[in-house]
Image (tube, helix red, strand yellow):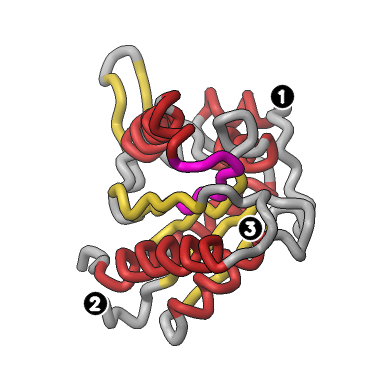
């Protein structure tokens, strides 16, 4: 368990309903992690703009001069040792708001550097990224159709590995649209425990 006073876990959510299971899970995770420092970023409440604009495109190619809201998110992530993305699965992917946050924030010059001459140089090695996914379908459907593997490839390999972040825990809560039940509560408890234990076990580099 890390006891570094500088350890901070940034929990990022993307759901419009503050009473949703997604927000319940994020708050439960934050509570489980305390007294470790935790910050919950509610992208809907904060009205983060996910649209990738011409200013974003220019900053992406220059590798600097990022829009002020993007620079603010960079500051948040630079203070964090662990990032936890808590989100509902929409069409076998993350919500557009969270995808836009990734598109705008995990950019060239900050999350990685790329050039034809030197290739790819990831820059987020100090960060560990964990995923906590809220899924409507049951685990059997995910297994039969390969949805879990597809999500892991898309996010763990396509984003986390690309920027050099360490992979943390990935946990699914299935059948999230069913009426609340003992089974759902047990699934939430297992997922929160898996991620919180992974965060507490993670030791940031000196």
In the displayed structure, 5 sits above or below 13; it is: below
Distance between mark 2 and mark 1 Cα atoms = 43 Å
CB within 8 Å, label 2 to label 1: no
Q: Position of residue 195 (x, y in %)?
A: 38, 63
How packed mark 1 is, by other alpha carbons closer than 10 Å (few <14, some 14-19, many 20 or more), is few
Distance between mark 1 and mark 3 Cα atoms = 32 Å
Snapshot quadrant of residue 65:
top right
- Quadrant where the C terminus lies? bottom left
Q: Which residues are magenta?
A: 131-139
**Which circle marks residue 54 in the picture?**
1
Outermost residue, top side: 116
Q: Which residue is mark 3?
A: 22
In the displayed structure, 188 sits above or below 150; it is: below
Q: Which residue is mark 2?
A: 1
How packed mark 3 is, by other alpha carbons closer than 10 Å (few <14, some 14-19, many 20 or more), is many
Distance between mark 2 and mark 3 Cα atoms = 26 Å
């Amino acid at each position: 368990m890390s006891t570094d006073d500088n350890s901070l876990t940034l929990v990022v959510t993307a759901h419009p309903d503050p009473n949703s299971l997604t927000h319940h899970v994020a708050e439960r995770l934050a509570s489980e992690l305390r007294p470790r420092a935790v910050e919950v970023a509610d992208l809907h409440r904060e009205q983060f703009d996910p649209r990738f604009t011409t200013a974003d495109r220019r900053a992406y190619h220059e590798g600097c001069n990022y829009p002020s809201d993007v620079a603010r998110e960079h500051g948040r992530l630079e203070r964090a040792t662990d990032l936890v993305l808590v989100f509902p699965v929409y069409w076998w992917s993350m919500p557009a708001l969270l995808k836009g946050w990734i598109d705008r924030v995990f950019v060239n010059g900050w999350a990685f550097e790329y050039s034809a001459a030197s290739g790819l140089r990831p820059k987020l090695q100090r960060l560990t990224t964990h995923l906590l996914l809220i899924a409507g379908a049951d685990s059997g459907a995910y297994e039969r159709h390969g949805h879990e593997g597809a999500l892991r490839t898309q996010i763990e390999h396509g984003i986390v590995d690309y920027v050099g972040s360490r992979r943390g825990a990935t946990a699914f809560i299935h059948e999230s649209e069913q009426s609340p039940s003992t089974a759902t509560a047990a699934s939430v408890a297992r997922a929160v425990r898996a991620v919180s234990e992974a965060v507490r076990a993670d030791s940031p580099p000196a």
